[in-house]
Amino acid sequence: MNTCSRIFADEAQINNCKETLQAKQAVFTELTQILSLAANEARLKILFLLHLENELCPCDLSDILGMTIPAVSQHLRKLKDGGIIKFRKTGQTIFYSLKDAAVLLPLFNLLQKPLTIESV
Amino acid sequence: MNTCSRIFADEAQINNCKETLQAKQAVFTELTQILSLAANEARLKILFLLHLENELCPCDLSDILGMTIPAVSQHLRKLKDGGIIKFRKTGQTIFYSLKDAAVLLPLFNLLQKPLTIESV
DNA sequence: TTCTTATTTAAATAATTGCTTAAATACTTA
DNA sequence: TAAGTATTTAAGCAATTATTTAAATAAGAA
């Protein structure tokens, strides 16, 4: 695979890096999956709104976000499949809420500061 | 846009949410952009490696990650265009390093714990 | 100058994503 | 039961993404 044969290449450093990645492979996979969910503006807004409001239904979210109900519903499904939101059903209304937001809290903190992100 | 006309809809809550989103629109845009960069396993690994090793060249990264040099190079360009890494040139070798990692630090913290992500 | 090395750039392509519209569920009420 | 409401599901499509291969830069060494 590697075509690089620099004299200066630090074999020990490279092997060390490889081992570190290998040891953390599972975390990388999982973290990437969660970041992929958060790395969409609509979904990031949904997650932040659930954080602020505790629970919301697809209908409200559609209204707030200005997007169609099916579009919202499909984002919610992704978040649900990813295991970071849960729901409760009451009548025909379904209320969604955050399930495991630990990884997201630092992001919410950024969003809750009255500053722009550059100043963090 | 909205087709929902629930009797229970809390107009005040919905308007409040809309205003919050509007006020933070710029932060959402920027945060989504950074998250999109981190939400790729190869790029997340690159960022974490730069965090650990201070600086690395495309050649080393290709070796460590087990992917072709052009593939690495294009990930590096995205990160550079996104403003979160910088580089210095020495001879024909280009060393990349983190530029503004503030937003990423909580993610690195997760990766540096010896635990799995669930236990956080 | 020519050859090699490190890297980037570009074109092509396969895979994934997010939205739209339309249809299907499922619950509620008349 | 029939009609209406909240939501999901599914198919289609345009846009984006990540990779591959090949070619182009750019610097150093022969």
Image (cartoon, coloured by chain):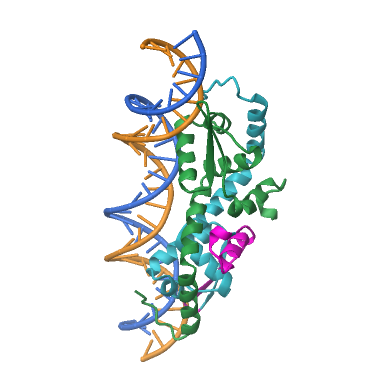
Chain colours: A green, B cyan, C blue, D orange
Q: Quadrant of the N terminus of chain A?
A: bottom left
B21 versus C10 height, above or below: above
Q: How many marks?
A: 0
**Residue pictured at 57% horizontal, 29% vertical:** A60
Residue B106 % position (x, y): 62, 60
Magenta range is B91-119
Residue B117 among magenta residues: yes
**Residue pictured at 48% horizontal, 71% vertical:** A23
Q: Nearer the viewer, residue C8 or B117?
A: B117
Q: Is residue A74 left or right of residue D23?
A: right
Residue A119 % position (x, y): 70, 54
Is residue A119 something that shows in the picture? yes
A38 versus D19 height, above or below: above
Q: Is residue B114 left or right of residue D20?
A: right
Q: Quadrant of the C terminus of chain A?
A: bottom right
**Residue pictured at 67% horizontal, 50% vertical:** A109
**Residue pictured at 54% horizontal, 56% vertical:** B82
Residue furthest out toward the right: A114
A75 versus C28 height, above or below: below
Is residue B3 something that shows in the picture? no
Q: Nearer the viewer, residue B85 or C10?
A: B85
Residue A97 % position (x, y): 57, 40
Q: Nearer the viewer, residue D14 or A39?
A: A39
